[in-house]
């Protein structure tokens, strides 16, 4: 049923139910999903590192006894980058060094240190890059503003697209012409309304500013 | 009239493919980065600071453990972080031997290494080290901001880290290292 809707070409002599732009976007979104699923399957086995025969440190995988401290430690660990497998946090990484870092983070939390203290301790040694929580300054401002800017641009483009598509017949890619066609349609509706009054038409005639006395 | 209609038709067709082309470009970039992740070669931010305080037991039988207190005895030294399971560490063994013979004090920290594996390594590759501390939870590398093995730190007589050498020490570097340590005396 959805496929029929998606593939339908013409409707009411106006633009197709799903225009080319919408179909293009859906196709692209579908491709994105496929790419990410495939790459996830391929790269899911990444991690590890080091041929160390030693078992993991005690608190690498063992949780703290106090659940509040454990959730504090966990919240911190997902925001710390693994220095070996740099695309992962130390919570996710299989690297032995990441296990040792989890061990030390848990010990420090159990010792009473705050998450921010531990983060600062690690940043002082590994650099700002080890934290997934970049501070807001002149260097990282684009990171924070970027999505907002892109959102505004996207909304502006979408608004323009929707205005253009208002009964956009083939060959007409001009908003003005679209408006003219709309007015013609309204005039035609008005002509038929004299012979056949109905509440729906009353709404459409009120749209045109000329009609409001 | 038909001409303008044709041109605008072509324009619409091109515009239709534009988002797809942009997405294709984005995919290309993302797939490239997925296959070749941007692994930054990390440098320790602790160079210039005092060596972290630690007290490590002997890494294996027949060697002495390492205490950071000994770093403030006025003698500059090398601190070599290694492991028996680390291949480049085997590559730099001859260079460390040469440095020890030239009178350089080399302290070692064995990372995540079972005592029997360390003994095996020393038997096969020799022991140029004054002390070998066993660090089984990477306590010292984490305190140093170090992420790999082997790494060698040049430490002055007051226990301040002067330089970090990442990776195996190559034959051409030994003279340079000896000169740097002489300058720190």
Image: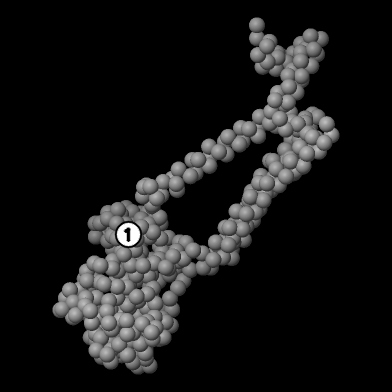
Front-lying residue, A130 or A51: A130
Where is mark 1, residue-wise?
A: A123
Residue B175 visible in the displayed image? yes
* Image quarter (top left, top right, bottom left or bottom right) of the C terminus of chain B: bottom left
Query: The residue tagged with tag 1: helix, strand or loop?
Result: helix
As displayed, is residue A118 above or below residue B169?
above
Q: Residue at x 25, y 86 (%)?
A: B104
Q: Is residue A69 visible?
A: no
What is the basis of the colouring in this image?
one colour
Front-lying residue, A100 or B149 = B149
* Residue B77 x, y percent position in the rendering: 24, 80
Q: Residue A171 in the image: state x and y as whole percent.
A: 78, 34
What is the quadrant of the N terminus of chain B in the image? top right
Write the residue at 30% across / 87% down.
B99
| Quadrant position of residue A80 | bottom left
- Relative to B37, A21 lies left or right: right
Using the image as rendered, state which of residue A104 and residue B86 is in the foreground.
B86
Q: Residue at x 41, y 46 (%)?
A: A141
Q: Quadrant of residue B85?
A: bottom left
In the rendered image, the vertical position of residue B13 relative to residue B132, given as above or below: above
Q: Is residue A100 above or below residue B61?
A: above
């Amino acid at each position: 049923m959805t496929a029929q809707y998606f593939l339908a070409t013409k409707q009411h002599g106006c633009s197709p139910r799903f225009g080319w732009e919408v179909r293009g976007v859906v196709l692209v979104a579908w491709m994105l999903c496929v790419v990410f699923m495939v790459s996830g399957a391929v790269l899911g086995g990444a991690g590890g590192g080091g041929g160390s025969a030693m078992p993991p440190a005690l608190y690498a995988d063992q949780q703290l006894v106090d659940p509040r401290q454990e959730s504090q430690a966990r919240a911190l660990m997902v925001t710390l980058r693994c220095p070996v497998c740099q695309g992962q946090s130390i919570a996710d990484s299989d690297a032995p060094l990441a296990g040792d870092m989890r061990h030390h983070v848990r010990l420090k939390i159990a010792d009473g240190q705050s998450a921010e203290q531990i983060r600062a301790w690690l940043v002082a040694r590994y650099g700002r890059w080890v934290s997934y929580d970049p501070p807001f300054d002149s260097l990282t401002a684009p990171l924070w503003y970027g999505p907002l800017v892109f959102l505004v641009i996207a909304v502006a483009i979408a608004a323009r697209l929707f205005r253009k598509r208002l009964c956009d017949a083939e060959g007409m890619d001009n908003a003005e012409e679209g408006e003219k066609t709309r007015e013609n349609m309204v005039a035609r509706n008005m002509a038929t309304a004299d012979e056949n009054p109905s509440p729906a038409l009353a709404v459409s005639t009120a749209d045109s500013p000329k009609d409001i006395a | 009239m038909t001409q303008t209609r044709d041109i605008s038709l072509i324009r619409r067709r091109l515009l239709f493919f534009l988002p797809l082309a942009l997405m294709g470009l984005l995919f290309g970039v993302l797939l490239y980065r997925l296959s070749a992740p941007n692994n930054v070669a990390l440098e320790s931010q602790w160079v210039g600071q005092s060596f972290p305080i630690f007290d490590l037991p002997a890494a294996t039988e027949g060697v002495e453990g390492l205490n950071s207190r000994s770093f403030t005895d006025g003698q500059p030294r090398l601190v070599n972080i290694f492991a028996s399971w680390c291949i480049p560490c085997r590559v730099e063994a001859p260079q460390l031997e040469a440095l020890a013979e030239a009178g350089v004090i080399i302290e070692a920290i064995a990372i995540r290494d079972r005592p029997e594996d360390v003994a095996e390594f020393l038997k096969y590759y020799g022991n140029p080290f004054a002390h070998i501390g066993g660090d089984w939870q990477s306590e010292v590398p984490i305190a140093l901001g170090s992420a790999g093995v082997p790494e060698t730190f040049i430490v002055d007589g007051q226990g301040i880290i002067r330089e970090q050498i990442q990776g195996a020490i190559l034959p051409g570097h030994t003279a340079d290292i000896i000169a740097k340590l002489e300058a720190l005396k």
